[in-house]
């Protein structure tokens, strides 16, 4: 295995950034029964999703380790 391949394989298993978002709710569904229900997104869940997605993208833009990974990807797989 070449040095580049070994380095790439090692990097694939690494966590480069960690983001955590939570939604506090009093409603609990069983993991076994939720599959059989029609799922509708509740208004508070919609707000959470909209806010957390925007927050995630903002945090992602600030994370230098993510920029490095995207730059490496672009180097090997970007358009010529």
Image (tube, grey):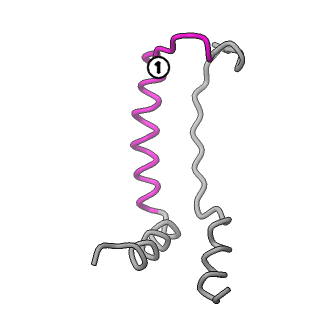
Vertical arrangement, residue 28 with respect to residue 55, above or below: above
- Identify the residue position indicated by label 1 in the image: 44
Estimate the x, y position of residue 21 in percent, counting from the top left. 57, 39
Q: Is residue 76 magenta?
A: no
Using the image as rendered, state which of residue 52 and residue 2 is in the foreground. Answer: 2
Q: Is residue 20 left or right of residue 49?
A: right
Q: Residue furthest front?
A: 1
Residue 57 magenta: yes
Query: For residue 36, what is the image quadrant?
Result: top right
Q: Nearer the viewer, residue 6 or 21?
A: 6
Q: Residue at x 46, y 54 (%)?
A: 59
* Horizontal relation, residue 69 to residue 29: left or right: left
Q: Which secondary structure is most common in the magenta stretch?
A: helix
The span shown in magenta is 35-62
Q: Say above or below: 9 vs 55.
A: below
Residue at the image point whose x is 62% and y is 17% from the top: 35
Q: Is residue 71 left or right of residue 8?
A: left
């Amino acid at each position: 295995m070449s040095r580049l391949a070994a380095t790439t394989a090692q990097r694939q298993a690494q966590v480069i950034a960690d983001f955590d978002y939570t939604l506090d709710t009093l409603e609990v569904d069983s993991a076994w029964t939720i599959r059989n229900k029609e799922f509708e997104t509740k208004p508070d869940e919609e707000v959470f999703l909209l806010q957390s997605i925007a927050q995630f993208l903002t945090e992602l833009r600030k994370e230098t380790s993510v920029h490095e990974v995207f730059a490496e990807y672009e180097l090997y797989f970007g358009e010529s």
